[in-house]
Image (cartoon, coloured by chain):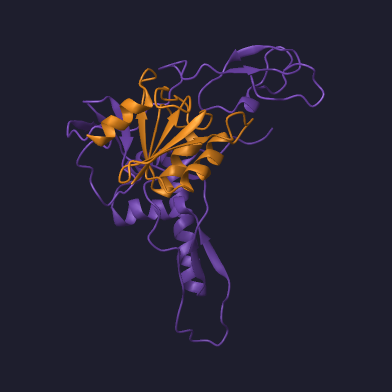
Chain colours: A orange, B purple
Amino acid sequence: MKVAITSTGNSLESKLDQRFGRCAFFLIYDTETLGIEFIPNPNKDAQNGAGPASVQMVASHNVQKIISGEFGIKIKSLLDSLKIQMIVLKEPEKSVSEIITMLNK
Amino acid sequence: MSPRPIRLRKVSSPPIISGFKPYGNKSNTVNTESVFLHLEEYEAIRLCDFEMLNHHKASLIMDVSRPTLTRIYAKARQKIAEALVLGKKIIIEGGKIYFDSEWFFCNNCGCHFNNPDKEETIKECPLCKSTGFSNSGQINDEPGESPTRCNDICICFSCGFEQPHQFGRRCNEEICPRCSKNMVRKGILYNRNTKSY
């Protein structure tokens, strides 16, 4: 199963990005093969519609869960219809490697 | 004056079919027209006639006022009657709606999560696999609760007025209080003619 985590940088020490649509990087983590892939977010500086465009990009990687600090109003209904689980973690100081170890437990 | 915008209706889950087709036409005139039943009207029929709730309870579930629900319900019955009497197809689509899902709060890791698959019940927290979680209802998106979700700033590109970005509102819907023009997110590249940023 693939999980997307929003990240502020492209290393495992970077912190969880509190925004979804305008986060810096998406970390796609595969819980079966333990593969990690960083994808830069092309919608980081989008003027509007960053959320739906990011959802489209993340959904094309067949993820089933998304971990972020926040999901906008437009995205919630979109992810609901795509049956992707949203996990809201309001801890900006947590690094993405900590989240991956939580997922592996 | 433009009319007041339509309030979004909450629909718990989409219908399992996308419409109905008539069969066995008695007269030879086949009616190829169709009736478009909106999703909110489907939901009103489901709550009032299938779940047997009264209009007040159904209106609370759909997050609209009781008179609005009664209007949606009356429209739905009118459309279904039209399809039955005139032998029209029913297509369920459209409407000003959003889908709602249940939210849970994990007591162990402090995360909120939702249940995307409504047929299955959640057994453990998807993040830390603990079973100590509780139903938290809807996540509160009141801006007053936590005012600074992100540290972004909305800026007016004509006079340079800045204000903190409000979560859940598009920057170009914000109006600059000084020159009453639409604002944009600060830091994005916006220079068609302006020299700034």
From the top left corner, tell me how far across and down residue A69 is, in percent: 41, 26
From the top left corner, tell me how far across and down residue A14 is, in percent: 43, 23
Residue positioned 31% across, 25% down in the render: A98
Residue positioned 45% across, 80% down in the render: B23
Visible in this render: residue B81? yes
In the rendered view, does A84 fall on the left or right side of B193? left
Residue positioned 52% across, 50% down in the render: B95
Residue positioned 57% across, 30% down in the render: A44
Between B161 and B7, the residue placed more toward the observer is B161
Residue at the right extreme?
A: B193
Image label count: 0
From the top left corner, tell me how far across and down residue B174 is, in percent: 63, 23
* Image vertical order of residue B77 relative to residue B184, above or below: below
* Image vertical order of residue B29 relative to residue B47, above or below: below
From the top left corner, tell me how far across and down residue A41 is, in percent: 54, 34
Visible in this render: residue B136? no
In the rendered view, does B131 fall on the left or right side of B140? left
Q: Locate the C terminus of chain A and report the quarter of the image it occupies.
A: top left
* Image vertical order of residue A61 relative to residue A7, above or below: below
In the rendered view, does B158 fall on the left or right side of B68? right
Between B33 and A72, the residue placed more toward the observer is A72
* Image vertical order of residue B146 relative to residue B128, above or below: above
Between B39 and B130, the residue placed more toward the observer is B130
Residue at the left extreme?
A: B131
